Image (cartoon, helix red, strand yellow):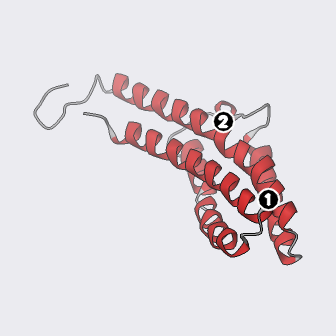
């Protein structure tokens, strides 16, 4: 039986990959002038992205994952958060100007690759943490009393 942390690792990394794919899809919609569909999807994507800082806080706080393990493409965790904030600001400003190509570029060229890079990193960190917790506990018993 898998533990909760392992399940969370898989689900969270899949969610990040799905957000990356959705950013690419939305970029294509903005470029293809399917603006109404793109705008609805953008609202959903930004709502999901609001959970990212909470995820990061959980990783570095209660789960005690070293922020250096969350370095992506040579960028520290703080730099990545600053990048994300900058990209979201750029999306909002471009959206206000109806500059759909800039919105598409930020989604596809900046945001999607960052989310895709985070997925395997997050999974690895959480699975390592789950393994360490299991080893520290000497393994856990499932509902039938088996390891």
User: Compared with residue 72, is residue 107 higher up or lower down, i.e. above or below?
Assistant: below
Quadrant location of residue 139?
top left
How far apart marks 1 and 2 lie (CA) works out to 26 Å
Would you call the spot at circle 1 few (<14 residues within 10 Å), some (14-19), or many (20 or more)?
many
Query: Looking at the picture, how far across and down is residue 122, in whole percent?
Result: 57, 37
Is residue 116 shown left or right of residue 132? Answer: right
Q: Which residue is mark 2?
A: 70
For the C terminus, the image quarter is top left
User: Compared with residue 17, is residue 27 higher up or lower down, i.e. above or below?
Assistant: below
Q: Is residue 90 visible?
A: no
Helix, strand or loop status at disc 2: helix
Quadrant location of residue 89?
bottom right
Number of numbered callouts drawn: 2
Q: Which of the two marks, 1 or 2, is nearer to us in this view?
A: 1
Q: Which residue is mark 1?
A: 104
Query: Looking at the picture, how far across and down is residue 38, in whole percent?
Result: 68, 68
Residue at x-position 71% and y-position 34%: 71
Is residue 86 shown left or right of residue 59? Answer: right
């Amino acid at each position: 039986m898998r533990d909760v942390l392992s399940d969370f690792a898989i689900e969270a990394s899949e969610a990040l990959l799905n957000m990356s794919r959705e950013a690419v899809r939305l970029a294509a919609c903005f470029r293809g002038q399917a603006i109404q569909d793109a705008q609805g999807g953008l609202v959903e994507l930004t709502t999901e992205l609001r959970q990212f800082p909470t995820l990061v806080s959980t990783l570095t706080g209660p789960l005690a994952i070293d922020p250096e393990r969350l370095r992506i493409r040579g960028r520290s965790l703080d730099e990545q958060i600053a990048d994300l904030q900058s990209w979201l600001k750029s999306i909002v400003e471009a959206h206000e100007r109806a500059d759909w190509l800039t919105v598409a570029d930020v989604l596809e060229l900046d945001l999607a690759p960052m989310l895709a890079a985070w997925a395997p990193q997050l999974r690895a960190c959480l699975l390592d943490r789950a393994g360490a917790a299991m080893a520290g506990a000497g393994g856990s018993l499932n509902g039938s009393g088996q390891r």
